[in-house]
Image (cartoon, grey):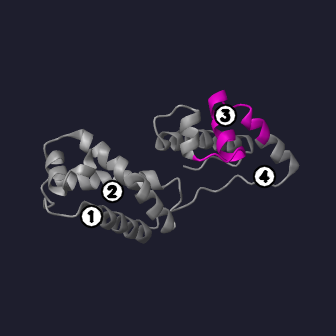
Amino acid sequence: MISHKSNEEVINSIRNGKEETLFALSKKYFQSSRRWLRRKGISDTATPAIFAKVLVKMFRDIQQNRLSTHVDLDKYIYNLLNEHLSKEKESRKFKRQPAILPASEIERDAAASCFTILDEQSKKLLSARYTEKLTFEEIAVRFEFSNPVIAEFEVHKSLNQFRQIAQARLNTGIES
C-alpha cells in the first residue's frame, strides 16, 4: 500500500518502472484532486482528463530524474494541478459545448425521437445520469464499471452520440 511508503520509496518505485505505483497514486489522489479542481471552477466532466494529464506529467518528471527523491508528493501534485490550470486558462481551452435547446414543440419531438435511436446501454446510462440524477460512482456500481471515471466516460460518450444524432436531425450541423 502506498500510504505506508515514504515519498522517496514511491519515487524510486516509479523510476524502477513499477506501474502499480502509478495506479496506487491515482487511487490515492484522484478524489481529492477532483474536489480541488471542482472548487477551482472546473466542470465535473473535465476533472478526470486534467488529473490524468497531471499524473502523467508527474510520472514522466520522476522517470526522467527531474524530481528529487525528497520532494513532498502531496504538494507537488497540487502545484502541477495549479500550473496546469493556469496554462489552460491562459489559452482559454475551457470552451463549453453548446447545449441542444429545442425552440419549438416540433424540435422537442424530433430530439425525443432521436433518443429512441440510441442503443439500450446508452439510453440506460443517460437516463440514470440525467433522469435519476445518479452520480458517476452510483452509475459505476449499477452498470458494473470498474470505477467512476469509466462510468463518466461512457455517459459522455452516450451523450455525445445523442447530441450528434439530434444535431443531424435538427439540421444544425455537427461541430468539430
**Can residue 121 be found in the magenta stretch?**
yes
Q: How far apart are marks 3 and 4 (CA)?
A: 22 Å
Which quarter of the figure has residue 113? top right
**Can residue 120 be found in the magenta stretch?**
yes
Q: Can residue 13 be seen in this view?
A: yes
Q: State the SS at label 2.
A: helix
Circle 3 sits on which residue? 124
N-term-proximal mark, 3 vs 1: 1
Residue 16 is situated, as x and y percent measured from the top left of the image, at 13, 43
The N terminus, quarter of image:
top left
Q: Distance between the residues labelled 4 and 2?
A: 38 Å
Q: Distance between the residues labelled 1 and 2?
A: 10 Å
Residue 72 is situated, as x and y percent measured from the top left of the image, at 22, 64
N-term-proximal mark, 3 vs 4: 4
Q: Which stretch is magenta?
A: 112-135
Mark 1 crowdedness (10 Å alpha carbons): few <14, some 14-19, many ≥20: few
Identify the residue at the far front of this view. Answer: 4
N-term-proximal mark, 1 vs 2: 2
Circle 1 sits on which residue? 76
N-term-proximal mark, 4 vs 2: 2
Residue 110 is left or right of residue 100, and the answer is: right
Identify which amino acid the numbered label 2 is placed on.
Val
Q: How far apart are marks 3 and 1 (CA)?
A: 40 Å
Q: How far apart are marks 3 and 2 (CA)?
A: 32 Å
